[in-house]
């Protein structure tokens, strides 16, 4: 386990060398490096260009640039981004030849410090190349300008910390254009601008730069007393401003230790420093169990929406996709999963509208239901005209009366079944469609079908899990903790009580029932809580060894539902990331058919 100093160093983007040498920044040799690649991960992508600039004392003392033959096609979108084509790299040296020249240019780990913008990306590719060639990676010290810029600049000065934004702010003489040497030169100007900022803060040596993030702010020092007197139990803590408004809500297994950590050098997040400077008091709620603390945190964030909390602020605005309830149902996106009725068939929640659209498009690929949004009545049928979906067999045109409500209801019932319980038809038909497209070498379209199937599987998995718990009116479970037990009462997906006891949990059933809230019956799919609370409880139940003490209804999920579909996709189809090779798809289809 890393100690606190190592944690601070990693947060600052610094990788320490074996030997610490006290050098001034003017005396230190820095090598600013940038790579262009065929993709985002060194596991399945290769380097196509390397650019590096060696600097010392504010002066450039050398440059290195070369294209690299990746031994694989460059994806079209990468060519559009960088301008590097397959023709340009066909006669370029391979990485096995280039890497030795690069190491020679950089020098030893004692001589030079590496600098890169988003250093984990560039250094990750170089380390991967060295590992592939069975070379020992030199123990270079590494600075990440994307990270250290956050200590030199505020959000009032720049809207983000991308290289283009920083280059514009510091007036770089080189415009970054996604070519390695140009981006390296721009990073040099950004790095010099950052060092000028640090100079005014008394940062003159490598040691100063390394330890800069370890500084405790005046606000942290003055408000350490917030942690005084806190218990060492699970609970929720609330930082409040001078108007008593919540600034930040957090949860922990140990209130005393967690709150104390906000006032030490281990806390390096800029927004938390800003929050502490505004905080005037701290409240806390100690709870018998960590699950209750996490649930209370979600509820408080949803209620008060503290500005320094980034997640869970808008739980009621989650997006779902549902089958409408009318004579001719269609798929529709809605905001607010908690508004769904138990009688409705729905998918989600989804992280974005695009993901919900993908899931709906998966249904359109499989079932010939209407895609128009107008309400169909006898009167509207007289003036309506069919769309192109009728000609291609994607819709039976109920809008003009070619399809009766009885005939259409058969199709909508199949859609509801696929959403709620049996997704095998979606798996089979979309795989057939993907296979046909791949055999025609239409790989981008095949990838789109795969993404639609993945979105449908994710949405079905989440909605079915949620319904499986909210359909149980009363569930009592227990978990062994040390010499005692944690006992929980859950009603319709809402945690209504928890207890910590040293006696048998079976003796606590009637007691915890008396402690719990009394919930009114509801027709909603989420009758008593938000989807985030239900999913939090589900993760607890799935990931811990809990014992069910009492359940008013069976806890059950469909055998061939979203879990089944997602398992089939994850195991076979989604391992294929490079869609440029027909045999990859063929192998995936064969494996899925066998399963």
Image (cartoon, grey):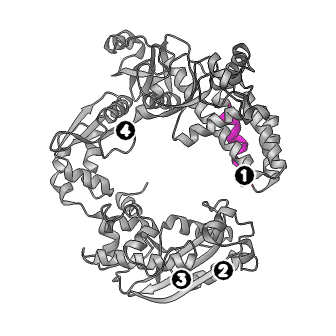
Mark before the other along the chain sequence, 1 or 4 = 4
Give residue 106's mark. 3
210 drawn magenta: no
Q: In which quarter of the image is residue 162?
A: bottom left
Q: Which of marks 1 and 4 is in front?
A: 1
Callout 3–callout 4 Cβ contact below 8 Å: no
Disc 2: which residue? 98
Q: In which quarter of the image is the N terminus?
A: bottom left
- Do we see residue 487 in this rendering? no
Q: Looking at the image, which residue is at 31% across and 65% down?
A: 157
Disc 1: which residue? 444
Q: Is residue 120 left or right of residue 421?
A: left
Crowding near the residue tagged with mark 3, few <14, some 14–19, many ≥20 C-alpha atoms within 10 Å: many
- Do we see residue 481 in this rendering? yes
Relative image position of residue 81 (x, y in whole percent):
61, 67
Relative image position of residue 577 (x, y in whole percent):
69, 52
Mark before the other along the chain sequence, 3 or 2 = 2
Q: In which quarter of the image is residue 221?
A: bottom left
């Amino acid at each position: 386990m890393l100690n606190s100093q190592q944690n601070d160093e990693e947060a600052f983007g610094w990788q320490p060398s074996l030997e610490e040498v006290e050098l001034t920044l003017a005396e230190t040799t820095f090598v600013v490096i940038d790579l262009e690649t065929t993709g985002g991960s060194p596991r399945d992508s290769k380097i196509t260009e390397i650019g590096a600039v060696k600097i010392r004392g504010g002066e450039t003392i050398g440059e290195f640039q070369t294209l690299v033959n990746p031994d694989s096609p460059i994806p079209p979108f990468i060519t559009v981004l960088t301008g590097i084509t397959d023709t340009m790299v066909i006669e370029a040296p391979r990485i096995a030849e280039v890497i030795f020249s690069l190491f020679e240019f950089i020098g030893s780990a004692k001589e030079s410090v590496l600098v890169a913008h988003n250093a984990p990306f560039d250094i990750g590719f170089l380390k991967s190349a060295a590992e592939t060639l069975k070379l020992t990676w030199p123990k270079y010290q590494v600075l990440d300008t994307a990270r250290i810029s956050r200590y030199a600049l505020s959000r009032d000065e720049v809207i983000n910390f991308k290289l283009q934004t920083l280059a514009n702010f510091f007036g770089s003489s080189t415009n970054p254009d996604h070519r390695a040497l140009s981006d390296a030169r721009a990073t040099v100007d950004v790095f010099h601008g950052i060092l000028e900022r640090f100079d005014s803060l008394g940062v003159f040596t490598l040691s100063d730069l390394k330890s800069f993030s370890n500084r405790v702010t005046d606000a942290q020092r003055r408000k350490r007393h917030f942690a005084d007197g806190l218990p060492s139990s699970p609970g929720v803590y609330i930082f409040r401003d001078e108007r008593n408004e919540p600034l930040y809500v957090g949860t922990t297994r140990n209130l005393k230790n967690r709150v104390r950590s906000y006032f030490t050098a281990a806390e390096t997040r800029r927004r938390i420093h800003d929050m502490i400077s505004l905080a005037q008091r701290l409240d806390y709620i100690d709870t018998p169990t960590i699950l209750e603390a996490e649930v209370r945190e979600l509820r408080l964030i949803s209620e008060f929406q503290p500005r320094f909390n980034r997640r869970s602020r808008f739980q009621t605005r989650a997006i779902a996709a549902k089958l409408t309830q009318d004579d001719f149902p269609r798929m529709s996106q809605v905001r607010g999963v908690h508004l769904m009725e138990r009688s409705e068939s729905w998918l989600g929640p989804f992280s974005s509208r695009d993901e919900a659209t993908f899931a709906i498009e998966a249904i359109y690929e499989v079932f010939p239901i209407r895609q128009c949004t107008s309400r169909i009545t006898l009167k509207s049928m007289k003036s309506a005209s069919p769309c192109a979906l009728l000609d291609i067999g994607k819709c039976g045109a109920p809008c003009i009366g070619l399809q009766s409500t009885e005939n259409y209801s058969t199709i909508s019932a199949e859609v509801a079944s696929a959403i709620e319980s049996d997704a095998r038809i979606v798996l089979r038909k979309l795989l057939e469609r993907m296979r046909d497209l791949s055999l025609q070498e239409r790989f981008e379209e095949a990838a789109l079908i795969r993404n639609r199937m993945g979105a449908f599987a994710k949405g079905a998995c989440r909605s079915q899990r949620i319904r499986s718990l909210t359909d149980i009116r009363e569930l009592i479970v227990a978990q062994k903790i040390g010499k005692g037990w944690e006992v929980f009462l859950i009603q319709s997906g809402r945690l209504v009580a928890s207890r910590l006891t040293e006696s048998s949990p079976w003796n606590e059933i009637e007691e915890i029932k008396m402690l719990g809230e009394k919930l009114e019956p509801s027709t909603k799919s989420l009758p008593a809580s938000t989807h985030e609370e239900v999913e939090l409880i589900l993760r607890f139940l799935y990931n811990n060894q809990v014992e069910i003490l009492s359940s008013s209804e069976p806890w059950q999920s469909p055998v061939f539902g979203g879990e089944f579909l997602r398992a089939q996709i994850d195991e076979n189809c989604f391992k294929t990331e490079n869609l440029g090779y027909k045999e990859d798809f063929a192998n995936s289809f064969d494996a899925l058919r066998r399963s």
